[in-house]
Image: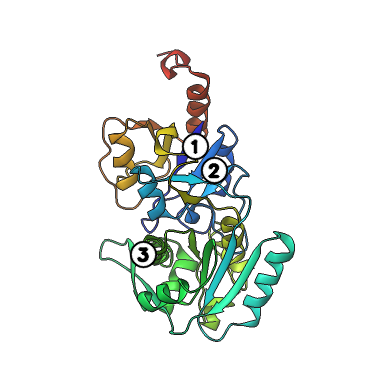
Amino acid sequence: MNVVMIIPTGIGCSIGGHAGDANPVAKLLGSVCDNLILHPNVVNAADINEMPENAWYVEGGMLDRFLDGEFYLKKPKSNKILLLVNKPVRPETINAVSAARHTIGCDIEIRELELQFDMEGFYNEDGTATGSFCGIESLVEQIKSYEFDAVAMATQIKVKKEIALNYFRTGGVNPWGKIEAIVSRAITDRINKPFAHAPIETDDQEIRYLNEVVDPRIAAEFISTCYIHCVFKGLHKAPRISDETGISVDDIDCLVTPANCLGPPHLSCLNKGIPIIAVADNIPIIKAEMPKEFIIVKNYIEATGLLVAMKAGIEAQYCRAD
């Protein structure tokens, strides 16, 4: 059984909208399926990534294209990872790479960008996150001169101090995640290889070393100095694009999503008749109207039970008294 799990970025989902706080859910869903295909922001949590062994770590834009039927996904034994950083490479980055090499066992090469890549995160008027970036074409041209299987990037994301501190102290929508997703999609579309950006990454000392008790869902960001180990773990065996072999959209049995979300992956699954389970407890700040085809459950425990029934070939109606 092959399941896709998505939690859209930048819209304030109560589970998975912060710092890897959907890892327990991913482990739960992964325990009842053969393969769980998810995107980085579901499990990225600075130095923590607890995705299950059967997880397929797929950049969001690549996942959308996969569900459109453009290509297969094939999981390798290992990827050579190219890490891109703005000049100069920092000692903590070198230490993070060394730690990943000697614990994960992955092959990572660090390269400084010839031209600085700039990113900024901020909010739309409706409270959802967005952002801007500059320098992508020169970045992509530089990438093309290297040999690699996957790309990690650790570059600063500028967020106004008052926005960052307010998020840490009162919660709300993560102001970094959406611009990460936007940039990841733009780069992946150009290189057609796995890509992920390190969460947060800021040079502001007050933010980097804020010594306060924060929302537990954000806490993973406060036990890290480089925020990138989660990306190395995800990219180590991230699936690659394949033209002929691997898993195709025709092999997908179900999509699990927060309720009141509707975007390209949902529409692709609806068009292909793939069942969509919507979790009512996980809602965004901006709610979309759900198509009647969505199967609504209360929480991820119910979603997991429904996946078990699907895997066993049992219609859910025969497991309810009503």
Residue at (47%, 77%) from the top-left corner? 156
Q: Earlier in the sequence, mark 3 or mark 1?
A: 3
Task: Name the disc covering residue 300, or none.
Answer: 1
**Real-space Cα distance between discs 3 and 2?**
28 Å
Categorize mark 3 by other alpha carbons within 10 Å: few (<14), some (14-19), many (20+).
some
User: x%, y% of residue 5?
Assistant: 46, 43
Residue type, mark 3 in image: Ala
**Foreground residue, 104 or 300?**
104
Residue position marked by numbered label 3 in the rendering: 186
Q: Secondary structure at mark 1?
A: helix
Residue type, mark 1 in image: Tyr
Residue type, mark 2 in image: Val
* Comparing labels 3 and 2, the label whose residue is closer to the camera: 3
* Comparing labels 3 and 1, the label whose residue is closer to the camera: 3
**Residue lying at the far right of the rendered structure:** 102
User: x%, y% of residue 149?
Assistant: 54, 61
Horizontally, residue 105 falls left or right of residue 25, namely right
User: x%, y% of residue 198?
Assistant: 52, 67
**Quarter residue 12 falls in:** bottom left
Task: Name the disc covering residue 25, or none.
Answer: 2
Q: Secondary structure at mark 2?
A: helix
The answer to whether mark 3 and mark 1 are in CB contact below 8 A is: no
Residue 78's place in the image compared with 221, above or below, is above
Categorize mark 2 by other alpha carbons within 10 Å: few (<14), some (14-19), many (20+).
many
Residue 280 in view here: no
Q: Secondary structure at mark 3?
A: helix
The answer to whether mark 3 and mark 2 are in CB contact below 8 A is: no
The answer to whether mark 1 and mark 2 are in CB contact below 8 A is: yes
